[in-house]
Image (spheres, rainbow, N blue to C red):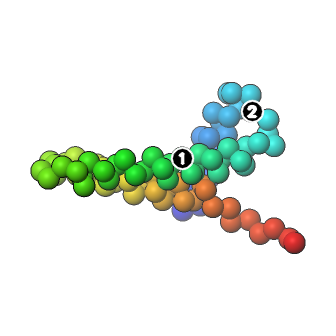
Amino acid sequence: MLSIRLAAENIIIHVLKKKNVPEQEWPVWVKKTGRGMLLASIPMIVPLLVFDHVPLALTIVLQLAYAALMCLGLMLATDDKKTDK
């Protein structure tokens, strides 16, 4: 799981470098991207709730996309680093 998270963070940081975002803001943007992925996962399930007869292939694709966005979003949105108080 750590390798997936690191790969996703590297992709996000690469995009942030291209957009000239200061390095101090990278952790904030990674968290924002994770929260956005959590929100983006919701529309993947809505068609399955609204429509009665969805083809099996589309159902599988939507469920896999939902799971991938949800898991990756949770990994990026949560901070596993301990802070000293």
Q: Residue at x 62, y 41 (%)?
A: 12
Quadrant including the N terminus: bottom right
Amino acid at pointer 1: Gly
Q: Residue at x 79, y 40 (%)?
A: 23
Can you name the residue that lies furthest to the right here?
85
Looking at the rendered structure, which numbered label has been put on residue 78?
none
**In-front residue for pair 1/71:** 71
Could you tell me if the residues under marks 1 and 2 are in contact, i.e. CB atoms within 8 Å? Answer: no
Image quadrant assignment for residue 4: bottom right
Quadrant including the C terminus: bottom right
Looking at the image, residue 66 sits to the left or right of residue 49; the answer is right
Image quadrant assignment for residue 75: bottom right
Can you name the residue that lies furthest to the top here?
19
**In-front residue for pair 48/16:** 48
Q: Residue at x 77, y 69 (%)?
A: 82
Query: Which tag, 1 or 2, sits closer to the chain's start?
Result: 2
**Real-space Cα separation, disc 1 to disc 2, in angstroms:** 18 Å
Looking at the image, residue 68 sits to the left or right of residue 61; the answer is right
Question: Is residue 16 visible in this depiction of the protein?
Answer: yes
Amino acid at pointer 2: Val
State the image coordinates of residue 39 (x, y, percent, origin top left): 48, 50
The residue indicated by pointer 1 is: 36
**SS type, badge 1:** helix
Looking at the image, residue 59 sits to the left or right of residue 22; the answer is left
State the image coordinates of residue 60 (x, y, percent, origin top left): 25, 53
How many residues crowd mark 1 within 10 Å: few (<14), some (14–19), many (20+)? some
The residue indicated by pointer 2 is: 21
